[in-house]
Image (cartoon, rainbow, N blue to C red):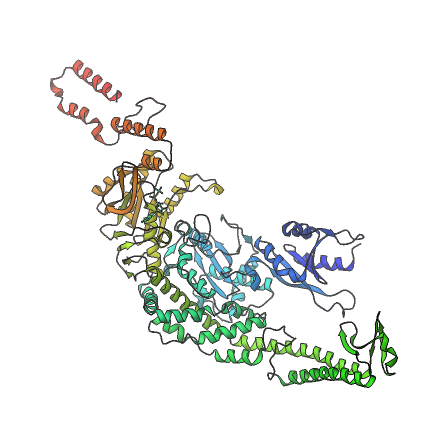
Amino acid sequence: MATPLMRQYHRIKAKYKDTILFFRVGDFYETFEDDAKLVSKELNIVLTRRSKDEPVPMAGIPYHALDAYLSRLVKKGYKVAICEQLEDPAKARGLVRRDVVRVVTPGTLIEDTLLTEDNNFLFSIYKHKEIYGFAALDISTGEFFAGELDFYGLNAEILRLQPSEILSNSKLNLDFQIKILAEEYYNDYEKILKEHFKVAELSGFGIGEYGLRAAASALKYAKENTMNDLKNITSLQGYFKDKYLILDSTTLKNLEIFHNVLGEDKYTLYHTMNKCETPMGARLLKRWMQRPLKDIDEINDRLDAVEELANKQLLQDSIRTILSRIKDIERIKTRVSLGRAAPRDLISLKESLKQADKLRINFESKILKNSASKIYGIEGIIELIENAINGDYPVGEGVIKEGYNEELDEIKRIASNAKLLIGKMEERERRNTGIKNLKIGYNDVMGYYIEVSKSNLSKVPKHYRRKQTLKNSERFVTDELKELEYKILSAKDRIYEIENKIYRDILKKLGEMIDVIERTAKSIAIIDVISSLARVALEMNYTRPEVDESMDIEIRNGRHPVVELYTDFVPNDTHINSDARFIILTGPNMAGKSTYMRQVALIVILAQMGSFVPADYAKIGIVDRIYTRVGASDDITRGRSTFMMEMVELANILNTATERSLILLDEIGRGTSTYDGLAIAWSITEHIHNSIRARTIFATHYHHLIDLENVLDNVRNYHIAVKETQDGLIFVRKVMPGGMSKSYGIEVAKLAGVPEKVVKRAKEILNLIEEEKVIEVRRGKKIIQTMLFGEENCSDILDEIKRMDIMNLTPLEALNKLNELKRKIENR
Ligand SMILES: Nc1ncnc2c1ncn2[C@@H]1O[C@H](COP(=O)(O)OP(=O)(O)OP(=O)(O)O)[C@@H](O)[C@H]1O
C-alpha cells in the first residue's frame, strides 16, 4: 500500500509522463521508479530505496545543486518537470501541497545558469505538402520569427540557427531529433497569436498560414512549459528569404563559417570576425553572417557605418571601452518581464544603461546615428533602480535602500532600536547584577537569552527565568528581553514581506518600461557589431568593397580571412564578369585551389553582410546564393556513397541556381571512373555555362577540360603555379591565367613521403600511358585498351580510307583492305 506521499507523486507524475519529475521533498529533489533509474545512470548518482517498507527505487539531488544537474539532463535532451512544495512544511496540516511549477526543456530555458551566450532557439515546423512553415523562438532574448520554406531552405535554416529543440506536426526526414506535437498546437493558431499579440488580424505579420501555425505552436509550447505568459515576446518577425544571400547548410559547412571541419568553433569566419564586446553584439553578428543582404543600399548603409568607425580610431576605442562594461541586458530584460530578475540583474541593468547613455554620440553614418537616437528614456529606469536597490542582497534581507519606502524604514528603525536596546541591556545587567561575564546571546532555537557562568549563579536576580542548563553555565530570559526579541523577530518577518512586495512592484514598474530596455539592447548590439567590423578592418587591413548590380567579382590581392592568420599568405586576384563567367582552375593537389575558391566566396559573404574585405580592392556584383561542391566526405550516416552524395548536391545546384548565383565546384566526378567523371564534368560545365549562366569557379584535375576555353565563350582558364625543381615541387600559390596541361599527382605523392620505389614505378607507368595513349593498365599487361579520346588516334587509318580509290578496287582487294584495317585497329 503506497504512502500518501507516493500517491501524491503518482498523481502528479501521471500528468507529466514524458518528463523526468523532480519531486521536492524537504531539502531534496527526489526522483522515483523509472525516473530514478534513468537519473542515477545519467547523472551518476546513487540509486537507493525510499524505505524498507516502501522499496521504491529513488535517487535525489540536493535542492541547491538543481541547476547543475538540470543543465546536464537538458543538454542530453531530456525534459524535466520541477515539482515544488507549495506551502511551508512546518505550517502545513497533513501532506504538504505540491505541484509542478515549470517544465524545463532544451528549447525553453530562461535560467541564466543554463544558457550560454549564444541564442537558444526553439524551432517549430508545420509541414503542408511541400511547404514547410517554420518558426524560431528564443524566449531568453524575446526574438521570434517565422516564415515558409522548401525542404532545402528548412534544412539550411535549422543548421544555421542550431536550435536546441525542434517541434513538428509530422515526421520529417531530417538529421535532427524532432518532437511530434499534437495538431491542436497548430490548429488554434489564430486564437493563440491574436490573444498573445493583442491584434485583431494576422495579415499584418505578412507571414503565410503555415508559418503562422508553426509560430503559434512554438508559443503555446513555450508558455506551457515555462508556465508563464511570456510577455517579453512582443513581436513576431516575418522571415523573407528573398531579402538575403542564401547560404545553404553545405555551404556553411564547406566554407567553415561557424564551425571548422572538425566541428570546432575556432579557425572559422565567425571566430575571426567576432570582436564584439557584448553578448548582444555577438548574437547579432552571427545573424548578419548567417544572412548577408542583397539590397545594395542596405549594404552600403552598413559599410558607411563601418567606415566611420574604421576611420576614427579614438572614437572606436572609447566606444569599445563603453561596450565592454555593458552586460547582457537583452537576457536581463527577459528575466525582468518574467518576474525572475535578481537584484544582481537590476544592478547590472542600471550600470549597463548608464554606459549606454554614453553611446548617444553624434555619429555621421545613418545606422549609427539611428541606433544612438534610439537610446532614450533610460533615465527613469536608472533612477528607479538607483533609488530602490541597495545592492546585491537577498530579497527580504536588505535589498531595498533606505529612503525608498517609509513603512519599511520605520520597521527597520524599530528593529535596530530593539537590537540597540539589547546591546545596552547587557551593559546594564552586568552593572546591576555585578556579574562581569554576563552575556546576551542568540540562537535559532531559543532566541535571545542571558548567559551566566556556574560560578556566578548566586548573583542571578529573581526575575530571571531559567531556560537551559549547560555544562559550565545557565541560560535565562526576562520579560523585557522577550519583548525586545519579539519586536526584532516580528520586524524581520515584516521586512521580509514588505521587501518582497516592493521588489515585485519594482519588477512590475520595470516591466512597463521593457520597450526602452529592448530598444536600447538593439541599439547596443548594432553599435557593437559595427565597431567589431571596424576593428577587424583596421587590424587586418581590410578595404571597403564596392557593391553593385553588375555580374563582376573583381578582387585585387584577395586573401582568405582565416588562412591568412596562420600562414604567410600569398594574395591573389579574381576577375569574373559577364564575359568571363566560368573559371576553370587547374593546379596540383595542395596548390591552394580550395583555399582560393573559399576566399572568393568569403569575400562575397563579407561584402554583402556589410563588412570590409581582405583585399586591396574588391567589386562585387550582388550574389543571390552561394553553392559549394567541395571535397568529398562520405555521408555514412545516410548510407550514401561519396559519389552519390556528390551527385545529390550537384542535382540541387543544377536545379536551383540562377544567373546571379556563385557556384564553386571542386573536383566533380572524382568518385567514379575517369571517363564517367570527365564526361559528367564536361557536360555540367556546358550546362552551367550555356543555360544557368551563373558565375562559377571549377577546380579540377581533368586538364582535358581546359580545352573548353576554346569552345565556350565565357570560360577562362586559370592555374595555380608551381615550380618544378630538382628537389621536387615548390608551391608558389599564385593564381595565373591559362590552364595547366599537366597534373603533378606523382610529385605531390613524393612530397607526402610515398616510398621512392612506388613513386618511380608510378612515373614509369605514367610514361607508358602517355606514350601508348592508353588510360588503363591492368595487372602488368602492357596495353589493354586504346584511348578513343578524340579522332587523332585513328587519323592514319582515316587518311588511308580517304585516299582509297574505291572505283578501281576489285571486291577481293576491297575485302583484303578492310581486313587489314581491322587488324590495325585491333592491334592498338
Ligand atoms: N594563397 C596562399 N598562401 C599561402 N598558403 C596557402 C595559400 N593557399 C593555400 N595555402 C596553403 O596550402 C594548403 C593547401 O591548400 P588547398 O587545400 O587549398 O589546396 P588544394 O589545391 O585545394 O589541394 P587538394 O586538391 O589536394 O584539395 C593549405 O593548407 C593552405 O594553408
Q: Provide residue 208's location: percent of width, then percent of height.
A: 44, 61
Farthest-out residue, top: 812
Q: Nearer the viewer, residue 70 or 486?
A: 486
Place of residue 620 in the rendered image (x, y in percent of width and height, measured from the top left)? 29, 58
Residue 77 drawn above or below residue 672: below
Q: Is residue 398 left or right of residue 677?
A: right
Residue at the image point whose x is 51% and y is 75% from the top = 350
Q: Is residue 624 visible?
A: no
Q: Residue at x 49, y 42 (%)?
A: 637
Query: In the rendering, at what x and y percent does residue 738 appear?
Result: 22, 44
Q: How far across and down, in percent of the image, does residue 251 sit?
A: 39, 51
Camera-nearest residue between 296 and 199: 296
> Would you say residue 812 is visible in this rendering?
yes
Quadrant (top left, top right, bottom left, bottom right) of the N terminus: bottom right
Count of marks, rendered view: 0
| Figure check: 698 above or below 27 | above
Left or right of 662? Residue 500 is right
Which of the 4 image quarters holds residue 541?
bottom left
454 vs 326, left or right, is right
Look at the image and tell me in which quarter the C terminus lies. top left
